[in-house]
Amino acid sequence: MILNNLKAIFIFVTCLTLSACSLFDIQPLDDKTKIVKIYDAFEHIEQCQFINELIGSEGTWYNYLFISNKDLTLGSINDLKNQANAMGANAIHIQYNLDFNTSVTFFAQAYDCAQ
């Protein structure tokens, strides 16, 4: 009985240890991502061409307690920038933050603006 409990504890600790590195990683900014500007006012992008809508998110139900709000926000912004770059956009208009207890999520639009 005690041996079975020790085995279960050992397996749990081993799994937790192996996944610990991934718990604290945030969405990195891709090496190929060019400069993507972020705007919160429509006036900055009203002359730009709309490309698509974006949702950037960082955090999950099992890791949000271990990652700072700053890093969660940065990961979500990096997610937006990577998506925008993949679409050929160079500007993002952030509409609003979607409120979730376990993550930081932004709803935005990607635009192509003349340089």
Image: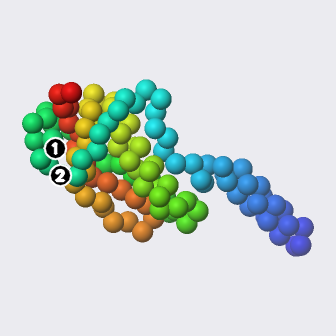
Q: Nearer the viewer, residue 9 or 57?
A: 57
Q: Is residue 13 placed above or below 54 in the rendered structure? A: below
Question: Which quarter of the picture shows residue 91?
Answer: top left
* Residue occupying the far left of the picture: 47
The amino acid pointed to by label 2 is: Ala
Mark 2–mark 1 distance (CA, rounded to whole Å): 6 Å
* Residue occupying the far bottom of the picture: 1
**Residue in view at x 67 percent, y 53 percent:** 20
Q: Residue beneath label 1, please?
A: 44
Q: Is residue 39 placed above or below 96 in the rendered structure? A: above
Image side of residue 9 versus residue 28, left or right: right
Question: Which quarter of the picture shows residue 6?
Answer: bottom right
Q: Residue beneath label 2, please?
A: 41
Q: Position of residue 83 (x, y in %)?
A: 34, 37
Question: Which quarter of the picture shows residue 109?
Answer: top left
Query: Disc number at residue 111?
Result: none
Which quadrant is home to the N terminus? Answer: bottom right
Q: Are marks 2 and 1 in contact (CB under 8 Å)?
A: yes
The amino acid pointed to by label 1 is: His
Whether residue 16 can be seen here:
yes
Give the secondary structure at mark 2. loop
Q: Position of residue 78 (x, y in %)?
A: 41, 43
**Residue in view at x 27 percent, y 28 percent:** 88
Image side of residue 111 versus residue 105, left or right: left
Q: Is residue 10 placed above or below 91 in the rendered structure? A: below
Give the secondary structure at mark 1. helix
Q: Residues within 10 Å of mark 1 (few under 14, many from 20)?
A: some
**Residue in view at x 58 percent, y 62 percent:** 66
**Residue in view at x 52 percent, y 48 percent:** 26
Whether residue 51 can be seen here:
no
Q: Position of residue 89 (x, y in %)?
A: 26, 32
